[in-house]
Image (tube, helix red, strand yellow):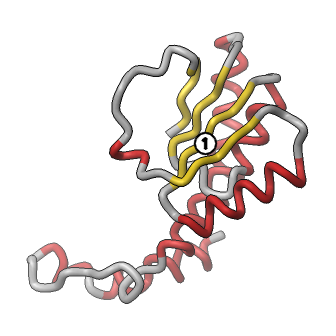
């Protein structure tokens, strides 16, 4: 898990002082790998955050739709939707990760879960059909 995190953020860490002092401006694909960041986030979510989320969500007695903003590979979304018998809606702004999420959904569950390519930081509006958000 930490190796992937380091691969994703290693160059940024090497330039951290220059970045803070506005002497270096990182660029995607050169200074950091968005795919590695998304994969690293997925591992961290699955191993460290999902158990806590399951505990919290179980106390809410959820019904309806769970929305995962930044669903990465979809593994956490699938896990939570199956655990609580919820429909799922995921958004991810990394094209490769959304392809992986859709493949994981197709191969690993019969639940009503959909993952979409979108910049979730730009989504606006109200969504009454969504009951629980996972960020």
Q: Nearer the viewer, residue 67 or 123?
A: 123
What SS does tag 1 mark? strand
Residue hosting label 1: 90
x, y percentage for residue 3?
A: 61, 79
Quick check: 46 left or right of 20?
right
Q: Residue 95 at x, y = what percent?
A: 56, 65
Q: Quadrant of the N terminus?
A: bottom right
Which residue is pictured at 70% across the width and 56% down the height? 101
Is residue 99 shown above or below 86?
A: below
- Residue occupying the point 57% across, 60% down: 41
Res 39 quadrant in image: bottom right
Give the class, few, some or many, for how many residues have Cα within 10 Å of label 1's Cα (few <14, many ≥20).
many
User: Taking 124 as reference, is 61 left or right?
Assistant: right
Q: Is residue 24 above or below residue 51?
A: below
Q: Residue at 55%, 73% (x, y): give it.
A: 35
Circle count: 1
User: Who is closer to the viewer here, 48 or 23?
Assistant: 23
Q: Quadrant of residue 4?
A: bottom right
Q: Quadrant of residue 97?
A: bottom right
Q: Position of residue 74 (x, y in %)?
A: 69, 50
Q: Can you give x and y, in whole percent of width and height, for residue 64 in the image?
A: 69, 16
């Amino acid at each position: 898990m930490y190796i992937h995190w380091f691969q994703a953020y290693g160059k940024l860490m090497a330039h951290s002082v220059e970045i803070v002092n506005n002497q270096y401006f990182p660029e995607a694909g050169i200074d950091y790998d968005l795919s590695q960041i998304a994969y690293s986030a997925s591992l961290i979510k699955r191993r460290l955050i999902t158990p806590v989320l399951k505990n919290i969500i179980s106390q809410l007695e959820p019904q309806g739709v769970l929305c995962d903003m930044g669903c990465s590979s979809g593994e956490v979304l699938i896990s939570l939707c199956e655990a609580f018998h919820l429909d799922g809606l995921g958004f991810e702004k990394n094209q490769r990760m959304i392809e992986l999420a859709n493949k994981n959904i197709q191969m690993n569950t019969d639940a009503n879960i959909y993952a979409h390519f979108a910049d979730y930081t730009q989504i606006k509006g109200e969504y009454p059909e969504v009951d629980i958000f996972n960020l």
